[in-house]
Amino acid sequence: MKHPLACRCGQLNGYVVCSGHENRGICYCTDCQAFAKYLGQGSTVLDQAGGTEIVQTLSEFVHITEGKDALRCIKLRERGLLRWYSACCKTPIANTPDNVNLAFVGLVHNCLEGQGHQPAESFGTVKMAAFTESATSRLKPKAYGVPSAMMRIVIMLLKARIFGGFKKNPFFNIETGQAISPPRVLSADELEQLKHNDAA
């Protein structure tokens, strides 16, 4: 089964192969909030408590068929994740480690909601809520499912290494090990401003 993946304007298109082992969760960390604000998409990415819905999978299951040259990425800090988005319409796409050998991909829900499809149809119910202490709502959501989600991710990464799936990654040049778009690293001041900007 394949689930469509696309940016909001349709320049970037692809699909995600549903392996049945994906982890669908909500992350309330301040970094995910800052990424949404950086794109000017806080109102469309974040829920009412500041959470970002993410589908965690492996790179081998993510396929970009059109508009790959529109992919851009930033890092909120030098040692941070690569946070990918489409340059054409600022749709958040995914979070990945800055390491081609780690095949983890966290797909942001916005790129999975086009063409009449919703993440729940292909990836099941939300099984995790993480970093709820950073939620922006007065009543904080309750965290759940984090240990089991981490275990699923570890198992997925091990399988990717053992069976060679890590060698398929649309976000990296496998031969050089470099990201296909050089990341822009935000300054500490830029990150601090984003984290305290409630209007974005």
Image (spheres, rainbow, N blue to C red):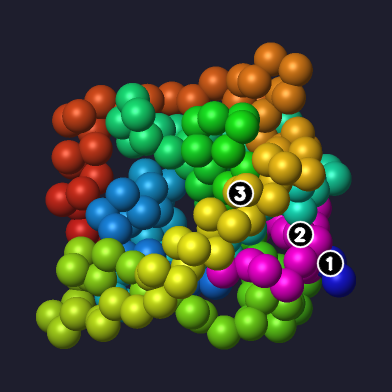
Q: CA distance from mark 3 to mark 2?
A: 17 Å
Residue 4 can be seen, yes or no: no
Would residue 1 be found to the left or right of residue 81 on screen? right
Q: Residue at the location (26% across, 81% down)? A: 141
The residue that disc 3 covers is 157
Q: Of the residues under marks 2 and 1, which one precedes in the sequence?
A: 1
Expressed as whole percent of the image width and height from the top left, the position of residue 178 reads 62, 20
At mark 1, the secondary structure is strand
Would residue 39 be found to the left or right of residue 170 on screen? left
Query: Type of residue at label 1?
Result: Lys
Query: Type of residue at label 3?
Result: Leu
Q: Categorize mark 2 by other alpha carbons within 10 Å: few (<14), some (14-19), many (20+).
A: many
At mark 2, the secondary structure is strand
Would residue 32 be found to the left or right of residue 139 on screen? right
Expressed as whole percent of the image width and height from the top left, the position of residue 188 reads 20, 29
Q: Which residues are magenta?
A: 3-23
The residue that disc 2 covers is 16
The image quarter containing residue 163 is top right
Give the vertical position of 125 relative to 12 (above or below).
below
Closer to us: 23 or 181? 23
Give the vertical position of 160 relative to 7 (above or below).
above
The residue that disc 1 covers is 2
Task: Report the quarter where the C terminus lies.
Answer: bottom left
Q: Residue at the location (63% across, 56% down)? A: 156
Closer to us: 5 or 143? 143
Q: Of the residues under marks 3 and 2, which one precedes in the sequence?
A: 2
